[in-house]
Every structure is written in structure tokens, then in C-alpha cells.
Amino acid sequence: MFPQSKLSKLALVTATGALAAATAAGPAIASPAGDGHAPYKGRVIAKTGLLVRTGPSTHYRVVGKHGYGKIVHIVCKVNGQNIRGNPRWYLLSDGSYGWSSARYIRNIGRAPAWC
């Protein structure tokens, strides 16, 4: 059923355009600071290095790695797969976005906000 009035048609076109624009833009990942930069930092404490994945679980594909002692930039945190008693995963923004277990990162400064 199609809208009959001009106002209904205008509302439908506006809503469709907004949905198309949002879909074309894709998901946006913004930092809590809103400036496009990760406001939190952490140091890699895993002796063998820190794996970066496409999602917050070891079931996701590995897309990068950071060495022991490296400072990483954290955007926010979520609950994901529990790794040795820690369910937190951090979204990192070092070069590209990816997820790493918080179990292997020591916060520098305050803890990251929730995504």
C-alpha cells in the first residue's frame, strides 16, 4: 500500500533517504572523546605478544599483532569471550581497528569506557 497524501509521500521519501545515507556510510566507530582519536592507552603485558582480531573472541580472525611492552591506543571496551578469568575486550585503533583481550593489556591511566 502506497501513501496517498503529499505529506505521507514526503515523509516516506525523507525516511528512505535517511536510511540509504546511513547504510551507505556504514558503521561508524567513534571514540568516547568524539575527536576520532582513542582517548585511552595500555601496555602489552603478554610475553609472546598481543594478537589483534576482527571481533572480541578467539574465534575471530587474527589481523595483527603487537609486541611485548608496546603502548596501544584503546577506543572502548566490551564483554566478550572470557580469557583466563577476564571477559573484557578492547577495541584498539593502532593503524586500523581491531579487538584484543584486556587480559593481556595493562591500562595506563583510567580504564576505557564501554563501547
Image (tube, rainbow, N blue to C red):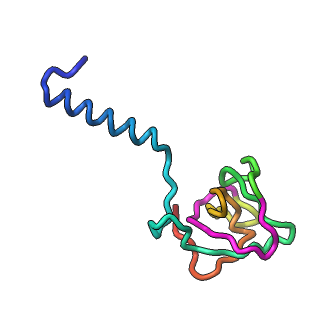
Looking at the image, which residue is at 64% across and 63% down?
Answer: 92
Q: Position of residue 37 (x, y in %)?
A: 53, 67
Looking at the image, which residue is at 56% across and 65% down?
Answer: 76
82 vs 17, nearest the viewer:
17
Tally the numbered discs.
0
Q: Quadrant of residue 7?
A: top left
Q: Position of residue 18 (x, y in %)?
A: 33, 39
Asked whether 76 falls inside the magenta stretch, the response is yes
- In the orientation shown, which residue stands out farthest toward the front? 95
Q: Position of residue 96 (x, y in %)?
A: 64, 57
Q: Position of residue 102 (x, y in %)?
A: 68, 67
Q: Is residue 4 above or below residue 19?
A: above
Looking at the image, which residue is at 73% across and 66% down?
Answer: 85
Main structural element of the magenta stretch: helix, strand or loop?
strand
Judge left or right: residue 33 versus residue 74: left
- In the orientation shown, which residue stands out farthest toward the top? 1
Asked whether 27 falls inside the magenta stretch, the response is no
- In the orientation shown, which residue stands out farthest toward the right? 48
Looking at the image, which residue is at 66% across and 64% down?
Answer: 94
Q: Where are the magenta residues, as a range?
A: 65-81
Q: Quadrant of the N terminus?
A: top left
73 vs 115, nearest the viewer:
73
